[in-house]
């Protein structure tokens, strides 16, 4: 993999073939998709999730995704399913079928485009027993490199007791977990101006981190490693507040043995911040060994050229290389 310039840990693919098949069978969602040149206009309605926008053609067409990955820089993509299609609020039968098909396809594409793409598994987390079964199949049998889950499960925070057995299994398998915001908090107050994404996404990541740290889960499951989307949401900027809260409030000490900074060892952060100074701050706050390049390809809230973002920073060459490639290789065991 040394001839590649970067690894992208935050990018998505929408398995349209699987969705078309499922929509005929279950009639639970509507897809309105029109290609226009290299772009695709989409309106998607799955359960209570609605998304409309213009995305890059690679969202649907894997050959376009590959082409876009090799055009300006050589980028290895570690792909996850788009969170608009997490399916956590649908019946377990539908979600289970979606994820089994998605993980099978992920395995095929990883084989076909070896050295260019890897995949993170998807799992039906609304049923933790089924989710564990599919996680084991995807990681052990299919060889996928990580697992992508939501920052909550339709309103259940990640410290919910029913989810603990999933984390125990992920800890046992030592598989990196990509936390992507979905079903975000305060939706009713964020519905205008695209605030569900602009504020809701980083907010929900912050809630997920707080739930994981203060629940004491990380004291018991020491292998767990999480990649946080969008630079870790508001967490890195509010780390001092987490820390202060731990020292002055009993509620925070109830289960967590250490103060929040100690648990930074469990978290990695992508680079999608759209602000050079914020990214410099993040690198100083959590350390360059915890930063991994992300693009949010093919969405409009992502970077067109994620490598240029890192290259434009005033950092020593070895630090850039860590962020562009080395940290991801170590975390996802890509060698
Ligand atoms: Zn994303």
Image: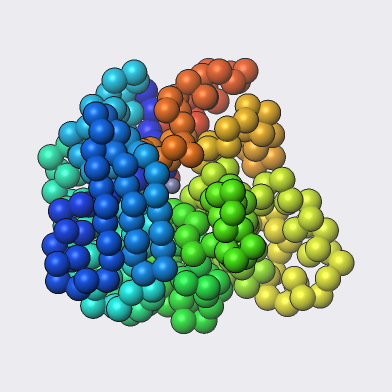
Whether 93 is drawn above or below 308: the answer is below
Q: Is residue 90 left or right of residue 99?
A: right
Percent x, y of residue 301: 48, 39
Residue at point 55%, 18% (across, down)? 312
Q: Is residue 92 left or right of residue 215?
A: left
Quarter the C terminus occupies: top left
Count of marks overlaid on the render: 0
Q: Is residue 102 visible?
A: yes
Nearer the observer, 15 or 28: 28
Percent x, y of residue 235: 66, 51
Q: Is residue 299 left or right of residue 315?
A: left
Whether 111 is drawn above or below 215: the answer is above
Q: In the rendered image, which quarter is residue 166 located in?
A: bottom left
Residue at point 54%, 62% (across, down)? 184
Q: In the rendered image, which quarter is residue 8 located in?
A: top left
Residue at point 18%, 66% (across, down)? 22
Whether 86 is drawn above or below 71: the answer is below
Whether 113 is drawn above or below 244: the answer is above
Quarter the N terminus occupies: top left
Q: How is the image coloured?
A: rainbow
Q: Is residue 143 visible?
A: no
Nearer the observer, 148 or 31: 31
Percent x, y of residue 98: 23, 65
Percent x, y of residue 248: 87, 67
Residue at point 46%, 55% (across, down)? 180
Nearer the observer, 155 or 2: 155
Q: Is residue 232 left or right of residue 297?
A: right
């Amino acid at each position: 993999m040394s001839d590649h310039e970067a690894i992208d840990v935050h990018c998505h693919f929408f398995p349209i073939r699987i969705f078309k098949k499922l929509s005929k069978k279950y009639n639970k969602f509507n897809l309105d998709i029109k290609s226009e040149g290299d772009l695709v206009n989409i309106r998607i309605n799955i359960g209570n999730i609605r998304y409309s926008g213009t995305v890059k053609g690679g969202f649907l067409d894997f050959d376009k995704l590959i082409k876009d990955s090799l055009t300006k820089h050589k980028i290895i993509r570690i792909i996850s399913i788009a969170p608009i299609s997490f399916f956590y609020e649908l019946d377990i039968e539908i979600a289970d079928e979606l994820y089994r098909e998605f993980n099978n396809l992920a395995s095929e594409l990883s084989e076909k485009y070896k050295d260019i793409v890897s995949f993170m598994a998807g799992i039906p987390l609304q049923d933790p027993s089924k989710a564990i079964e599919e996680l084991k199949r995807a990681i052990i049998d299919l060889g996928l490199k990580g697992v992508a889950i939501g920052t909550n499960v339709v309103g259940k925070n990640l410290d919910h007791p029913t989810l603990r057995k999933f984390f125990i299994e992920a800890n046992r398998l030592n598989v990196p977990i990509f936390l992507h915001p979905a079903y975000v908090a305060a939706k009713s107050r964020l519905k205008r101006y695209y605030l569900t994404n602009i504020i809701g996404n980083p907010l929900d990541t912050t809630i997920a981190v707080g739930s994981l740290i203060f629940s004491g889960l990380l004291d018991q499951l020491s292998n767990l490693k999480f990649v946080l989307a969008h630079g870790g949401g508001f967490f890195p900027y509010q780390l001092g507040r987490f820390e202060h809260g731990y020292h002055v409030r009993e509620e925070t000490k109830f289960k967590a043995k250490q103060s929040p900074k100690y648990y930074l060892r469990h978290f990695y952060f992508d680079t999608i911040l759209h602000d050079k100074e914020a990214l410099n701050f993040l690198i100083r706050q959590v350390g360059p060994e915890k930063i991994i390049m992300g693009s949010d390809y093919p969405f409009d809230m992502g970077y067109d050229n994620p490598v240029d973002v890192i290259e434009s920073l005033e950092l020593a060459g070895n630090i850039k290389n860590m962020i562009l490639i080395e940290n991801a290789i170590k975390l996802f065991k890509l060698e």
